[in-house]
Image (cartoon, helix red, strand yellow):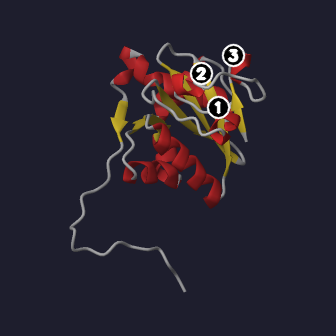
Amino acid sequence: MLSTIGDPSRREGKDHGPDHCARRSWVLPHCQRKGLTVTDSREGVWGLWIARRRLVVVLVGREGTPRKAIRSALTDDARFGLLEYLVAAGMDLVVSESLACVEPLPVQAVHRGLVVWTASDVIVAALLRAAAIRDPARAAALLGRLPAISMLRGFLRRLSLPETDPRQLPFLGLSR
């Protein structure tokens, strides 16, 4: 399920000019069918939050306003589709430390070349409580705003993968 936040002209069904999506860092489904491409991909940060039955990713622009929210099911196919979308957008991703431990998407995003930042669970919980945020989309937007706040930027750590010997075989996780 795909939804947008803010400007109603970004919603599906509007008839736009041929360069409508070429000026933006996102592509509407009807523009994607027409073959229009994305030219500007470094205009914001994604915040990732987990809800009861779905993942919520919100794009926060440079000015700190949420621009787009994407909700994805907790299935492998939906995670793969969301990861492909995030890689195509090419922007940074911010997650909480606990989510980075239990959710495979941030680790796969690092494997695919995205920059993933983790925020301390204590800081995230304090900010969510202080702002009285209970909605998953608003929580994801709060995570997406953290790199823009200079006082809180120091609490972010870059998610990195452990160094492995190139001769070592990867663990496939298959069981009989």
Image x and y of residue 11, in percent: 73, 25
Disc 1, SS: strand
Cβ atoms at labels 3 and 1 below 8 Å apart: no
Residue 5: x and y, percent? 68, 23
Q: Residue furthest top?
A: 63
Tell me the element at label 3: loop
Name the image quarter holding residue 55. top right
Left or right position of 1 against 18 = right
Percent across and percent down for residue 138 are 64, 26
Q: Which mark is residue 139?
A: none
Label 2–label 3 contact, CB within 8 A: no
- Return the residue at label 3: 7
Q: Which residue is mark 1?
A: 69
Q: Residue furthest front?
A: 18
Which residue lies at the image location 50% right of the left edge and 27% below the top edge? 144
* Three-letter residue code for mark 1: Ala
Q: Amino acid at mark 3?
A: Asp
Give me the residue at 69% from left, 16% from top.
7
Q: Is residue 32 above or below residue 162?
A: above
- How much space separates mark 2 and mark 1, taking CA atoms? 8 Å
| Label 1 crowd (10 A; few <14 / some 14-19 / many >=20) | many
Q: Nearer the viewer, residue 103 or 17?
A: 17
Image position of 105 with respect to 168: above or below: above
Q: Are marks 2 and 1 in contact (CB under 8 Å)?
A: yes
- Of tags 3 and 1, the one toward the viewer is 3
Mark 2 highlights which residue? 66
Q: Quadrant of the C terminus?
A: bottom right
Quarter of the image with the N terminus in it: top right
The amino acid type of the residue labelled 2 equals Pro
Q: Earlier along the polypeptide chain: callout 2 or callout 3?
A: 3
Q: Quadrant of residue 172?
A: bottom left
Q: Is residue 116 visible?
A: yes
